[in-house]
Amino acid sequence: MTIHYSSKPSQTKGLNKESLLMIELFNWFGAQPGGVGSYRKFEENALELALDLPEHAASLRLLADIAARFVETYADQPLPAGVADAAFKKMTSIVEIISASKDSSVEERLAALNAIAVQNIV
């Protein structure tokens, strides 16, 4: 995944490369239209980043799995607008949980990962 830092400099000042890459993935997803193709590309990007960012591999793998389930469900059929909107909001909220837990204790991050592991957006 080629990363172009589009976050505001004030938001990224002092962050390490790993944090910047995670932010960029989340920003990229937030700018997508929310169709099946967006989830397919999100899955690919998350899996690629998981290889590069082992300290975030669990959360990235969970996000990729959630996106993959969405793609499997809707790949060969029309995507109703209401479903697309609801799934996009749910996925965005899951991403926000991960983002909010990045500076938390190990126990709190594990709790966030466990909460995400049972999420489904379809």
Image (cartoon, grey):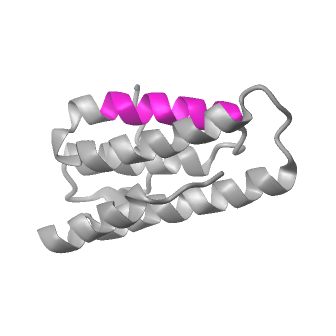
The image position of residue 101, as x and y in percent, is: 29, 68
- For the stretch drawn in magenta, what is the main secondary structure? helix
- Which is nearer the eye, 96 or 28? 96
Question: Quick check: is 70 in the magenta stretch?
Answer: no
The reply to whether residue 10 is in sight is no
The image position of residue 51, as x and y in percent, is: 24, 29
29 over 77 or under it: above or below? below
106 over 95 or under it: above or below? below
78 over 58 or under it: above or below? above
Question: Quick check: is 46 in the magenta stretch?
Answer: yes
Q: Quadrant of residue 92?
A: bottom right
The image position of residue 97, as x and y in percent, is: 41, 67
Stretch of the chain drawn in magenta: 36-49
Q: Is residue 1 toward the left or the right of residue 66 in the image?
A: left
- Rendered residue at 32%/63% (across/down): 114
- Rendered residue at 50%/46% (across/down): 66
